[in-house]
Amino acid sequence: MTKHHVLVVDDCEDVRFLLSLRLQNLGFEVLEAVDGHDALSIIEEDYDKEIEIILLDVMMPKISGPKLIQIIKERYEGRNIKIVCITAHYDEDIETDLRSIGVVDVIKKPIKGGVLDKRLRTIIGSAA
């Protein structure tokens, strides 16, 4: 069985740890990045891992979530990487703005129970 690769990008170590643990328990192979620069390095260096989904915090230092999305869409256009944003400051306008720049889903923090699994499985299923 092929493992799906997910890159978790969040400046909060506890959030990264919990998301990574949850994703690994669900059968995903997980890479972690502490900020946008780290994420770009990982995408470039781990090209062979075929990152399918990026789970991205909207509010981060150095490079904001929306700016990172723009860079990824420009640099890696042919890679078909799905971007899912996570945010503690959710509202419909934010979701609309994020979807308009290519985000496939927005999940509100704290992430409840089976929400993450269900959403990621839906995204992977739609990409198959």
Image: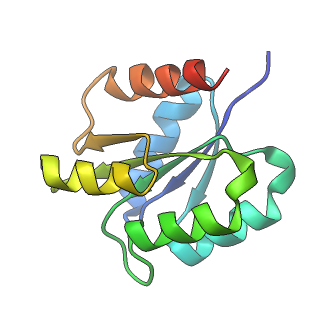
Residue 11 visible = no
* Residue at screen point 77% across, 66% down: 44
* Residue at screen point 23% across, 45% down: 109
Image location of residue 88, percent across then percent down: 19, 53
Q: Quadrant of residue 66?
A: bottom left
* Residue at screen point 59% across, 61% down: 73
Q: Image height check: is 27 above or below 43?
A: above
Q: Nearer the viewer, residue 12 or 106?
A: 106
Outermost residue, right direction? 48
Q: Tell me the quadrant of the picture where the C terminus can be found.
A: top right
Image location of residue 64, percent across then percent down: 38, 74
Image location of residue 65, percent across then percent down: 40, 66
Left or right: where 92 falls relative to 26:
left
Q: Nearer the viewer, residue 22 or 7?
A: 7
Image location of residue 36, percent across then percent down: 52, 72
Left or right: where 10 falls relative to 74:
left
Outermost residue, front direction? 100
Q: Tell me the quadrant of the picture where the N terminus can be found.
A: top right
Q: Image height check: is 119 above or below 65?
A: above
Residue 14 visible = yes
Left or right: where 88 falls relative to 20:
left
Q: Nearer the viewer, residue 11 or 125?
A: 125
- The mark tally for this picture is 0
| Colour basis | rainbow
